[in-house]
């Protein structure tokens, strides 16, 4: 079982093996979060706040960050600042269920990172451990950091995007059809249910700048073309 305690223990052991400063960050905790935190995720946030390999830092903020990235959907999320050029967040359904870890890159692609917060953190730690056995440290930590980020971009399929008007018929998938009825005709939808890590929806290629909207009962997302200068749909 993946726990915050076991992950922190592995990171402390790794820090003793590498010839540079690998700092293990304390957990941010979950006491101040404005939404319910299930027991398993609470234990993770209590024991592990991330780690840093200069110049790379993985940090769990433990707080919503909608203000910093208003393109994210309305449902609540916990976000990680990872220094990789995007925003990583846990998809939290309106009923409080914590689901996939997703990343939205600066260019707008929405990527599936892992099926859960525990699986994502385990992949981070496992990658850090594996690279310690493969990378020489003669040139300092930079080669290690570069390989670390490259390894965290799994190859996966590009998910199909669906035009909203084509999904509104009653005989379509209920989650897709219900969301399609709530967004304008120029919106595009992608289904992230059961999507493997590395799967990605390139909404930016279909509609340019956009705001994400999530279905009420499934990790199904719509990209609504957005005029950010005037903060309104296009």
Image (cartoon, rainbow, N blue to C red):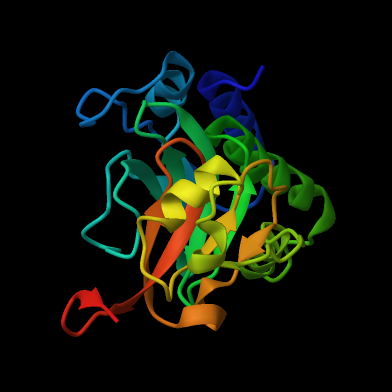
Residue at image position (38%, 47%) is 79
Residue 201 quadrant = bottom right
Front residue of this view, candidates 213 and 113:
213
Instruction: Confirm whether residue 189 shows in the render.
Output: yes
Outermost residue, right side: 134
Q: Nearer the viewer, residue 71 or 139?
A: 71
* Residue 158 location, quadrant: bottom right
Q: Position of residue 228 (x, y in %)?
A: 24, 80
* Number of numbered discs overlaid on the protein picture: 0
Q: Is residue 22 visible?
A: no
Residue situated in front as seen by the camera: 27 or 88? 88
- Give above or below for 107 relative to 15: below
Asked whether, in this view, residue 209 is left or right of residue 230, the answer is right
Above or below — where is 198 with respect to 95?
below
Out of 209 and 42, give the one closest to the viewer.
209
Residue 32 vertical placement versus 226 (above, below): above
Specify the quadrant that holds the N terminus: top right
In the rendered view of the protein, which quadrant contains the C terminus? bottom left
Which residue is depicted at the point 52% across and 34% down? Answer: 99
Residue 104: horizontal and vertical position, in percent? 48, 63
Q: Residue at x 39, y 80 (%)?
A: 209
- Residue 18 lies left or right of residue 38; in this view the side is right
x%, y% of residue 118?
57, 30
Residue 45 location in percent, x, y?
40, 28
């Amino acid at each position: 079982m993946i726990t915050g305690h076991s992950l922190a223990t592995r990171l402390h052991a790794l820090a003793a093996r590498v010839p540079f400063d690998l700092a293990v960050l304390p957990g941010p905790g979950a006491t101040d979060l404005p939404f319910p935190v299930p027991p398993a995720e609470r234990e993770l946030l209590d024991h592990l706040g991330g780690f840093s390999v200069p110049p790379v830092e993985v940090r769990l903020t433990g707080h919503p960050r909608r203000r910093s990235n208003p393109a994210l959907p309305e449902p609540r999320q916990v976000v990680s600042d990872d220094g990789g050029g995007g925003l990583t967040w846990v998809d939290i359904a309106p009923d409080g269920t914590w689901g996939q870890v997703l990343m939205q890159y600066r260019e707008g692609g929405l990527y599936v990172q892992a099926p859960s917060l525990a699986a994502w953190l385990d992949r981070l730690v496992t990658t850090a451990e594996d690279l310690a056995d493969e990378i020489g440290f003669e040139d300092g930590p930079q080669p290690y950091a570069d390989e670390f980020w490259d390894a965290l971009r799994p190859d996966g399929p590009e998910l199909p995007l669906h035009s909203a008007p084509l999904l509104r018929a009653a005989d379509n998938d209920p989650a897709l059809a219900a969301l399609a009825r709530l967004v304008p005709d120029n919106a595009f939808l992608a289904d992230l249910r059961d999507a493997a890590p590395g799967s990605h929806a390139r909404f930016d290629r279909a509609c340019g700048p956009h705001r994400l909207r999530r279905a009420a009962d499934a990790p199904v997302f719509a990209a609504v073309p957005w005029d950010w200068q005037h903060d309104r749909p296009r």
